[in-house]
Amino acid sequence: MAERGRGQSPSAMEDLLDVENKRMADSLASKVTRLKSLALDIDKDVEEQNRYLDGMDSDFLSVTGLLTGSVKRFSGMARSSRDNRRLLLAVSAALVLIFFILYYLVSRAGT
């Protein structure tokens, strides 16, 4: 830069520096604009993800309530008479069998 200014009048040198400063200021302004746009996009994405997580939280709470009720009913049935224990054993065996059948079918469908 100092090489360019040798042999020129101070006014011409100031004009050169002024032009270069304006070019650099424009470059900086465009970079700031891109960063602002990126920050706004990140903010919008974070808000969407927070809404999604809040929805998942309420869904998990409702599922927790359903499972808690089911476990209480299942425990009550297990503590009752001998006939209910046989029924409980049959239902448990059927659920395990259904699980293995579904696992087998899904593994066969994946290959």
Image: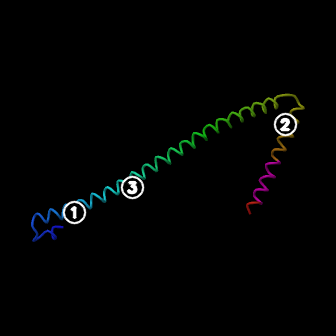
Q: Residue at x 14, y 65 (%)?
A: 13
Q: Position of residue 55 (x, y in %)?
A: 60, 40
Task: Tell me if residue 62 comes above or below residue 107 in the rendering.
Answer: above
Q: Residues within 10 Å of mark 3 (few under 14, many from 20)?
A: few
Q: Which residues are magenta?
A: 97-108
**Quadrant occupied by the C terminus:** bottom right
Q: Earlier in the sequence, mark 3 or mark 2?
A: 3
The amino acid marked with disc number 2 is: Leu
Q: Earlier in the sequence, mark 3 or mark 1?
A: 1
The amino acid marked with disc number 1 is: Val
Quadrant in which residue 109 is drawn: bottom right
Where does label 1 land, which residue? 19
Q: Residue at x 67, y 35 (%)?
A: 62
Secondary structure under the numbered disc 2 in the rendered image: helix
Secondary structure under the numbered disc 3 in the rendered image: helix
Where does label 2 land, which residue? 88
* Residue 21 horizontal side relative to residue 32, left or right: left
Q: Residue at x 78, y 31 (%)?
A: 73
Where does label 3 land, which residue? 34
Q: Nearer the viewer, residue 61 or 81?
A: 61
* Residue 98 horizontal side relative to residue 48, left or right: right
Secondary structure under the numbered disc 1 in the rendered image: helix
